[in-house]
Image (cartoon, helix red, strand yellow):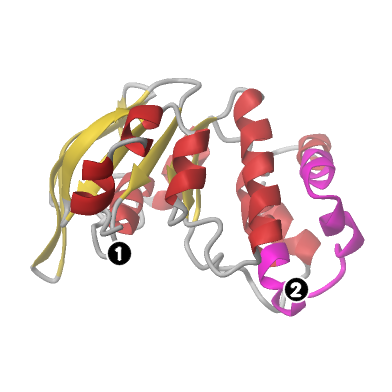
Amino acid sequence: MLQVRGLTLDYAGAVALRGVDLDVEEGELVALVGANGAGKTSLLAGISGLHRPVGGSVRFRGTEIGALPAHRIARLGAALVPEGRRLFAHQTVRQNLLLGAYHERTERARAASLERVHALFPVLAERADQRAGTLSGGEQQMVALGRALMSRPSLLMLDEPSLGIAPKIAQMIFGVLAEIRAGGTTMLLVEQNLRAALALADRAYVLQTGTIVMSGPAAELADSDDVRRSYLGL
């Protein structure tokens, strides 16, 4: 579904990614792990169109998307749940969710997507008319995830979904991700909680200072003391 080859990305001349190769097969959940500053968020930004790469190729279902703007990539079926949630704080929960379905042409399709999100996160139905900025951190993360799901993505990319939320809510969100994955959605997950990420994932890549240094089955990487010591700083 996703093929990244030789991806290079910089910020005002400072290199963030150097020749990254990565594959995500249809139906997989792939984890991307590494220490702070390794380039994980930059990689998602390069794939999703938020920051244009300076070299390499990004192909989504056979289509080159490396030069496309973010809204066109989202329309193709690749949705990002960004780090920090980035909600429209003064808009209601319902308004934030419906923005995720901006490209849906029929009210019926939008209503069906909204019903699915409410089934996954019932509290969002209760908070529908509440301003998103007044929600707890965990509830805001549910809105961010729900907004991405409103577009019915075939590839869901998540950047640190458990960051800054209570452990109990984080556990619930990981359960929802497992349910979404079981429903057939392919996922690329960046997550600070190494144990949770590798428990969910089929495969994983370890990123260090902008370069992939190791990859393999998630269970093998989870058991590797070398990965934990050398690449994750644990």
Please state if 14 lies on the left or on the right of 201 as rendered. Answer: left
**Residue toward you, 210 or 85:** 210
Q: Check disc 1 and give the amino acid type.
A: Asn
Which quadrant of the figure contains the C terminus?
bottom left
Q: Nearer the viewer, residue 181 or 154?
A: 181
Residue 97 image offset from top left, x and y in percent: 71, 55
Q: Residue at x 25, y 32 (%)?
A: 215
- Magenta segment boundaries in residue numbering: 114-139
Q: CA distance from mark 1 to mark 2?
A: 27 Å
Q: Quadrant of residue 11?
A: bottom left
Q: Nearer the viewer, residue 226 or 152?
A: 226
* Amino acid type of the residue that numbered disc 2 sits on in the rendered structure: Leu
Q: Is residue 53 visible?
A: no
Q: Name the front one of labels 1 and 2.
A: 1
Left or right of 223? Residue 96 is right
Q: Secondary structure at mark 1?
A: loop
Instruction: Name the spot of residue 59 as percent of width and height, x first.
Output: 29, 30
Mark 1: give few (<14), some (14-19) or many (20+) Cα within 10 Å. Answer: some
In the picture of the structure, the residue carrying the numbered disc 1 is: 36
Q: Name the image quarter holding residue 203.
A: top left
**Place of residue 147 in the rendered image (x, y in percent of width and height, measured from the top left):** 65, 52
Q: Nearer the viewer, residue 143 or 206?
A: 206
Q: Is residue 201 visible?
A: yes
Residue 8 on image: x %, y %:
14, 49
Residue pictured at 64% horizontal, 71% vertical: 88
Residue 12 versus residue 54 in the image, above or below: below
> Circle 2 is placed at which residue position?
135
Position above or below: 153 against 45: above
Q: Is residue 98 above or below residue 224?
A: below
The residue that appears at 73% across and 72% down in the rendered structure is 132
What is the residue that sits farthest to the right in this orientation? 126
Question: Which residue: 52% across, 45% down?
Answer: 196
